[in-house]
Amino acid sequence: MTANEWLMIAGMTGVTFGIRYVLFAVADRIRLAPWIEASLKFIPPAVLIAITLPAVLLPKGEWHVSFSNPYLVSAIVTTAAGILTRNLLATIGIGLSAFFAYRFFL
Amino acid sequence: MRRDLGLFYISNRLVLEPAVSSRKQEFIDGVRDTFPLLLGAFPFGLIYGAVAVTAGVSLAAAMAMSVFVFAGSAQFIAVGLVAAQTPVAIIVLTTFIVNLRHLLYSATLLPHLKDLPQRWRIPLAFWLTDETFAVAVHRFQKKDSSSCKHWYQLGSSIAMYLNWQFWCFSGMLLGNRLPDASNWGLDVAMPVTFIGMIIPFVKTIPLAVCALTAGAASLLTLGMPYKLGIIASAFAGIGAGLMAEQVGKRTREALRA
């Protein structure tokens, strides 16, 4: 490993752990305002969907909104499976099968 | 005297600390509930490993990044920047911005972890990922009185960590022999597992409003660099969710009056 690589890994480790730890570090010493506490429950769906939707509608970095987009088709199937089965493993299994079946047959 | 004190502490601990079996059970449950999500991470690890060694990062550095940084999207972007001869300072700054969403995750977990000692908070912070966050929040939100829900998060964390190391290393070994791995469509595993994670969170109308708004915002902020659109969209979704909650509350009050 070169010195530059060491530096990069040390830096990336520092900032990544720093972001993940800074609030935990002071967790017992800070009190969240009630309105912040009330907004925490919105964080998981908000962040996760903001990561996911672009990956479905722009799978290769370009807009692809049509039924010829297997990512979109499998996302729709996965959503339906998730609502109907309420089972994560089944949902993911159905979603992946839909994707590869669709690609295979079309 | 000293011996008596020791006995006192031992008996106290036996009373105050939960039984080993319930810790073990939480840990196992955490591993089990994370299992489906390992499926979504594996192609990313594999492709990361292959891309890293072909981008000109040494095998040791690529592996060290997985072991110490442990952040999939940041690792991907970093090896891309290395291939483009980007200065280290810019790579570190980019990593910082790309990982900012973890600040939101740790804020969400804060109320549940604030009573734990630092020896717990440090490893749980180091191992925080999108997937572990999603399953752990569900566990913490359950109303039961278990006092070892952090063991559940630990189980999830370790499962994600070992899975990531294994697949990254496999990708590095396969390296050039995986020439068009990125065209196999394995990357579909990410949206599929994430959709599976999102659905159980959308339990009420305000949460649905939040999800739809954040989704729409994520498409309108695609032009923002360093994935900052994710943070902007999250705030838009949170704001919309809070507003929907207020509207719902006022409507119910008006109907009651």
Image: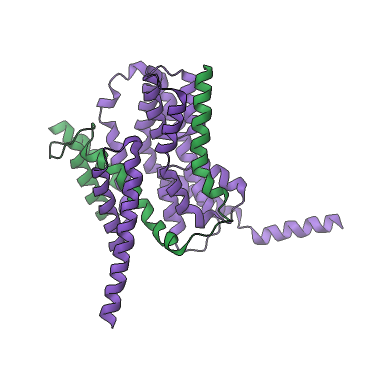
Chain colours: A green, B purple
Q: Is residue B190 above or below residue A24?
A: above
Q: Is residue B11 above or below residue B225?
A: below
Q: Residue furthest bottom?
A: B257
Q: Nearer the viewer, residue B97 or A55?
A: B97
Q: Residue B110 at x, y = what percent? A: 50, 54
- Asked if residue A76 can be seen in this view, the reply is yes
Q: Is residue B255 above or below residue A22?
A: below
> Which quadrant of the figure has residue B244?
bottom left
Q: Quadrant of the N terminus of chain B?
A: bottom right
> Which quadrant of the figure has residue A69?
top left
- Asked if residue A87 can be seen in this view, the reply is no
Q: Quadrant of the C terminus of chain B?
A: bottom left
Q: Nearer the viewer, residue A48 or B251?
A: B251
Name the residue located 43 percent from the left edge and 49 percent from the top edge.
B104
Q: Does residue A15 appear to the left or right of B229 in the view shown? A: right
Q: Residue B2 at x, y = what percent? A: 85, 55
Q: Residue B83 at x, y = what percent? A: 37, 19
Name the residue located 43 percent from the left edge and 19 percent from the top edge.
B57
Name the residue located 43 percent from the left edge and 59 percent from the top edge.
A36
Q: Is residue B14 above or below residue B257?
A: above
Q: Does residue B230 appear to the left or right of A16 in the view shown? A: left
Q: Residue A51 at x, y = what percent? A: 32, 42
Name the residue located 48 percent from the left edge and 28 percent from the top edge.
B65
Q: Does residue B254 appear to the left or right of B115 in the view shown? A: left
